[in-house]
């Protein structure tokens, strides 16, 4: 019984130490708060405040832009990795299958193409006498 109590005590001691270490490392350090904005009392103070704000705008835009660029680069990297690892192999295997079918069917398609060319030549040659008739004469023949 005493051994179990000691084991439980040590377990909870270890757990409390572990949670303390974890909480100390996981809490981010707070950023220093900016100085509170004090309204200027005269025009010179307003001018200084405006200049300070005017200088802060490009800095904040540059910081936001740099953060966005980092995010875009990470997104592009993830997309490229996803493409290379997942989609590209599927498309390559699919293309290999299609390429095999094309090579198998190519002679058949060429033969069919030659047959179609011959048929079209024969149709053109047999239709040559009709070529002299105009549209009106063809229409009359259809009505009769």
Image (tube, helix red, strand yellow):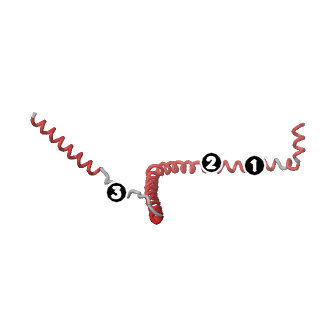
Q: Residue furthest top?
A: 1
Coordinates of residue 45 in the picture (x, y in percent): 44, 64
Name the residue tied to disc 2: 108
For mark 3, give the secondary structure. Answer: loop
The C terminus: image quadrant: top right
For mark 2, give the secondary structure. Answer: helix
Q: Earlier in the sequence, mark 1 or mark 3?
A: 3
Residue 29 is drawn in which quadrant? bottom left
The N terminus: image quadrant: top left
- Image marks 1 and 3: residues in contact by CB distance under 8 Å: no
Q: Name the mark nearer the viewer: 1 or 3.
A: 3
Residue 93 is left or right of residue 11, and the answer is: right
Coordinates of residue 60 in the picture (x, y in percent): 45, 60
Query: What residue lies at 69% left-to-right and 51% top-to-bottom?
Result: 114
Q: Earlier in the sequence, mark 2 or mark 1?
A: 2
Q: Name the mark nearer the viewer: 2 or 1.
A: 1
Query: What residue lies at 57% left-to-right and 51% top-to-bottom?
Result: 103
Name the residue tied to disc 3: 32
Coordinates of residue 76 in the picture (x, y in percent): 46, 55
Coordinates of residue 106 in the picture (x, y in percent): 60, 50
The front one of 67 and 114 is 67
Q: Name the mark nearer the viewer: 2 or 3.
A: 3
């Amino acid at each position: 019984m005493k051994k179990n109590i000691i084991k439980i005590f040590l377990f909870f001691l270890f757990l409390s130490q572990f949670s303390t270490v974890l909480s100390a490392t996981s809490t981010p350090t707070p950023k220093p708060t900016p100085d509170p904005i004090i309204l200027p009392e005269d025009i010179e103070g307003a001018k200084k405040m405006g200049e300070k704000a005017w200088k802060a705008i490009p800095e904040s835009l540059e910081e936001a832009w740099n953060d966005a660029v980092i995010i875009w680069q990470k997104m592009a990297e993830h997309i490229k990795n996803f493409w290379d690892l997942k989609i590209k192999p599927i498309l390559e295997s699919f293309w290999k299958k299609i390429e095999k079918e094309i090579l198998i069917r190519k002679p058949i398609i060429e033969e069919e193409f030659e047959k179609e060319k011959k048929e079209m030549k024969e149709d053109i040659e047999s239709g040559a006498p009709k070529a002299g008739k105009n549209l009106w004469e063809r229409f009359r023949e259809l009505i009769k």
